[in-house]
Image: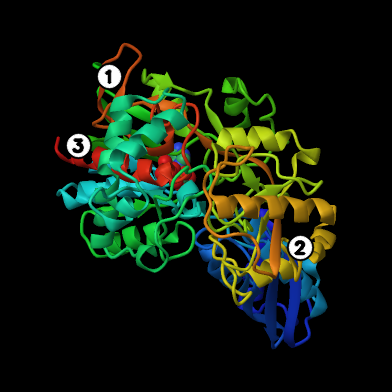
Amino acid sequence: MKKLALFLALVLMLGVLDAPATAMEDGAFQGAAKGNNADLVVEVVVEGGAIAAVTVLEHSETPGICDRSLVEIPEAIVAAQGLGVDVLSGATNTGKAILEAAALALEAAGADVEALKAIGTAEVEQKADETIETEVLVIGAGGAGCAAGVQANQLGAKVIIIEKQASVGGNTILSGGALNAVNDRSEQALAYDDSVEWHYTQTMNGGDNQGDPLLVHTLVRNAYAGVEWLQEMGMSFEDDVSGLFTVTGGMWPRAHKPSMPVGTGFFDTYQRYIDGHEGIEIMLNTKAESFITDETGKILGVKATGETGNTITFLASKGVVLASGGFGRNVELRTKYDNKWGCLDETILSTNSAGATGDGIYMAAAVGADLVGMEHIQLLPLGDPASGSLSGNIEHDVERRIFVNKEGNRFVNEGGRRDEMTEALFAQTDSWMWIIMDSDCYPAGDELNNFGEPINQLIAEGRAFKGETLEDLAAAIDVPAENLVASVNAFNEHVASGEKDEFGRTLYSTPIDNGPFYAGPRVPTVHHTMGGVRINTKAEVIDRSGNVIDGLYAAGEVTGGIHGSNRLGGNALTDILVFGRIAGENVAAR
Ligand code: ADP
């Protein structure tokens, strides 16, 4: 089939046939297909019977993750004059939606779409196997890997970061961007009665004191320095505009919010650094497979598979940083270790990137690394009902929203722990809830949610609902109006008194009384795997006998022992930043 496709492409390119294989009408044609979150609309321009241009006109795909697909797949369709082009790993749904929408547009132009599907990306010849030498090799271009790589390079090391997907970002770029960090000396910390010590206490308590106290101290003490480091590299946060906020499950207003949507601000910053400096590069579509060790167990490098299926042997003279993320998308691992939820098979969706398959756990375990807390798997009550993703979530912060079930009743402390909120959600009808808020966060009705999506667009897509009054909103989402009104009124009374309510909630700011009102549906979703490779405060990996594995560092979601049984919201970005930098610093110092 591939040979035939290549032949047809060549025939078209050389103009051997008098008429194109598929007769198309000239003009501009549109097609729409379901993307990850909503319909994606593509326009195809046909000129002289050939595909002259392909453009994605509308989409609601996640920024950062979809960027390359939106550009490269349309270009590939034009270059191949066909629809059989490859989608990009890590963004397969976006790629498929572009191809499907383009097919509908071409069908409208009169094309033989089936014939065009056979014409596509020419087969790529497998490159020769090769050996690449570097000082530091980082596995994974998510938040932890990029922090480690940039930090090591700043200290003079030659760094290569390998990423198995076609784009950087991992779970980090999909997050809402909330980064917990306390500056003890700041007015904000004083205003919110916060401190590094309180951050420590809440992190330990939130994880049932199962986190390693030394690692947690390291986390909270270095958090704010991490924010300053990012700011020095040009990253901006909303702190001056909107202050710190409480992210769901964060328990306290100490989250910094990047100015750019979702996690894109981190990667924009790292990419600018990488583009402007020598001795650091990212190799995409390059998958680490196993560690290379000497007879003493020292890590010498990594065997990887390159973009064309060739083997690349990376030799890292200073060491390797494992930053390959968690295993939220690995059903086998999550069902093997889970001892809490009992329902983590493929029927439950996940917020995670396609890359979160726990590769690093297998690789590290194979060289003797100890694994800690693998049974602690975090679910959020905040998944999109169709995709499980965080996208479409209308809440801005904990204080100004409540959760109600299908009966219109509140059922949990919405300022509490993530595990408790999700357990409570599982007990509701269809494990389904509505986030209810007023117009405080959406005064003009076209503002963005924390994921860069305009609220009016979410409403147009049927992913959020609006009512001039609470009764209108209840009708729109089909919950009993008297219950919804009673729930909101009772909540407002607690906001006024500031007293703890019957669910134990203490985090309030303004009442829900400023119409129009908004509702968004949410379901349980797998979010974060707290367990993983055991590290010490230098981010060195510890083996099953308690010794350091020479030359191996790890940071981020691939590690365990920090968050205990339940991670505070906003602490993951802190973790990857703090321990990524520590790993980078220590490996560079070798
Ligand atoms: P963290 O938050 O710990 O940085 P992320 O999920 O943000 O974790 O990033 C981890 C990155 O590692 C993802 O981009 C993922 O695709 C990548 N990755 C996972 N396994 C491998 C592997 N075997 N080789 C290269 N990259 C990998």
Say if 11 sits above or below 160 in the image: below
| Residue 322 in sight in this render | no
* Callout 1–callout 3 Cβ contact below 8 Å: no
Q: Which residue is mark 1?
A: 297
Q: CA distance from mark 2 to mark 3?
A: 56 Å
**Secondary structure type for disc 2:** helix
Q: Which residue is mark 2?
A: 470
Residue furthest front as drawn: 497
Q: Residue at x 81, y 74 (%)?
A: 107
Which is closer to the viewer, label 2 or label 3? 2
> Could you tell whether 464 is left or right of 320 in the image?
right
- Amino acid under label 3? Asn
- Amino acid under label 2? Leu
Say if 500 sits above or below 485 in the image: above
Ligand 1 positioned in quadrant:
top left
Q: Which residue is mark 3?
A: 586
x and y, in percent, of residue 285 in the image: 46, 49
Which is closer to the viewer, label 2 or label 1? 2
x and y, in percent, of residue 217 in the image: 28, 33
Q: CA distance from mark 1 to mark 3?
A: 19 Å
